[in-house]
Structure formats: C-alpha cells, structure tokens
Amino acid sequence: MNSARPAVASYFDLSGRTIVITGGAGLLGLQHAEAIALAGGVPVLLDLAAADPRGRAGELAERCGRDAVGMTVDITSLADVQRACAELIASRRRIDGLINNAANNPKVEAGQKESWTRVENFPLDVWHADISVGLTGAFNCSRVFGAQMATQGAGVILNIASDLALISPDQRLYRKPGLSDDAQPVKPISYSVVKAGLVGMTRYLATYWAPMNVRVNALCPGGMFNGQPPDFVDRLTSLIPLGRMAALGEYRGAVVFMCSDASSYMTGAVISIDGGRTVW
C-alpha cells in the first residue's frame, strides 16, 4: 500500500470549514447542518427568530460534539445578509460554503378553501413571499457569501432545488374526494418556479465564479417522509421506482460530497436523488 496516497475519507473531510445554511433551523436544514458537523465542519444556521436558530445550533453542537453557530437573519433583506457575513468575518471565520436551503412550502390552513392553490386563485401576496424567500433570498446570500468566497479564492455554493425543478407536479397526488375539478387543491406554481429558478441560478453562477474557484451545484431531492397522510404516501410511492419516500438523513451523504473536495471537479451540476422518480 502506498502510504503517500490520502485515505478516501480525507476527500470528504470538512474539518475547519465554515458552511452557511439558510433555513438552517428547519427540518431539512438541520439534516444538512448535522451532516456538515459530523464531517468536521462548522455549520452556521441562518433562520428567522421564530425558528430559534441559536437554540437549534446549541442542541446540534451538544448532540454532535462539534461547534455550530446560529444567527437570526432575514435572507430577503440584503442588509441583514451583509450584516451576518460581516459578523462571521469579524469573528475570524472564513466562509467556505453556502447551502441555499430556505424556501416557503405553503400548506392549506384549517378552515381555508383548498382551491386557493390553483393558478386561477393563487394569491399574489403568497407568490411574492415565495419568490422573495426562495429566489431573492438565495440571490442575496449567493451575492454576499459568494463574493466573499471569490475574494478568498475558493468556496462552494449548494442550491437545494427539488425533483419538481425537473418535472411538473403530478396534481393527482393532491386530489380530495368530493370536490369538483375547479376546487381541487394543487401543488402551488410558485414552488416549481422557485426550484427551477435555483437550477438556472446554479448554472449562471457556476460559470460566473469559475475563475475564482467558487463551485456552484444543485441538489434535487425527492420528497422526505415526515408523517404525511397514508393515502398521499401511497400515491406518491407508486410513482417512485424504489417504492418509498426518502428517510430522514438520506441526503446527508450527498450534501457532504457536494460541499467537500470529493466533488472538486464538479460545478454547474444538477444532481437528482429522488428514488428514481424523474426516470419514470
């Protein structure tokens, strides 16, 4: 055995690297953060005050025995994102990566008519809010943290898109018995637009910052099981070759790969991990 060759595990080592995660205190954001921490990195959880990013970071640090940072940030505000970046730099932290994870995923509230999700009825305030978080927020964070990484001469941006960035939602999944066609709920159009937009942003920034060694890629995950109604799960899994939704934590390996030197020759890539759904 040639002892001069590094162990394969070293390619995935994030020791000493600081990775910023938007929506970091949410369900999927915390999975990304734990993956970064377990690979030796320092996750920085950006989220709104109501999500308690500082508290979630403290719990993560205790659970993993690693450093973690939580910051209250509204990513729709460029000034707030700039403040967060300045604070991290002032604390002598180098920005090594950004995971654009934050997104609205509106759900029908109790007593609300489900037909509001349809294109003909879709509220403009919801449209603007979804675009503001999912696209404008990702742009704000990319321009601020990406520019910092470009100045440093290296870095990684990972955009969390969706299988619905690659295919249209199958609206049959959301149908409710007893409702007329024009009253049936659907997956909101804003979700598809945001996730497809992230793919476009990925490709643009990948070429824009390639000379500065800032790599930009997108991950398109499929649905993760989180206690959804059995009838919905049955319908969805019938569309997935592996016959199930993703389990909690199944995207961790991909996140570490795409944030580490293991993917050093990858930029502008769009990786689908969806149990095969987009193949059918």
Image: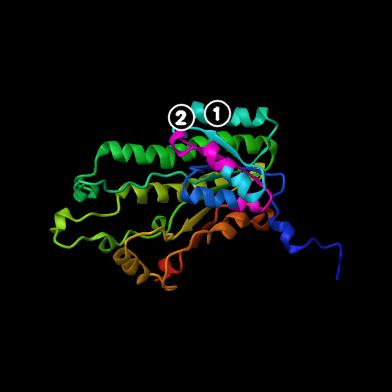
Between the C-alphas of marks 1 and 2, the distance is: 9 Å
Seen at 37% across and 40% down, the residue is 131
Q: Residues within 10 Å of mark 2 (few under 14, many from 20)?
A: some
Q: Quadrant of the C terminus?
A: bottom left
The residue tagged 1 is 82
Image position, residue 166 (x, y; %): 41, 58
Residue 179 located left or right of residue 160: left
Q: Amino acid at mark 1?
A: Gln
Question: Is 41 colored magenta in this rendering?
Answer: yes
Seen at 32% across and 59% down, the residue is 169
The residue tagged 2 is 77
Q: Are marks 1 and 2 in contact (CB under 8 Å)?
A: no
Q: Which disc is residue 35 wearing? A: none
The kind of secondary structure element at disc 1 is helix
Image position, residue 41 (x, y; %): 67, 47
Seen at 47% across and 50% down, the residue is 27
Q: Amino acid at mark 2?
A: Ser
Image position, residue 234 (x, y; %): 33, 69
Q: Which residues are magenta?
A: 35-58
Q: Is residue 233 above or below residue 33?
A: below
Question: Is 23 colored magenta in this rendering?
Answer: no
Seen at 42% across and 61% down, the residue is 225
Image position, residue 262 (x, y; %): 67, 58
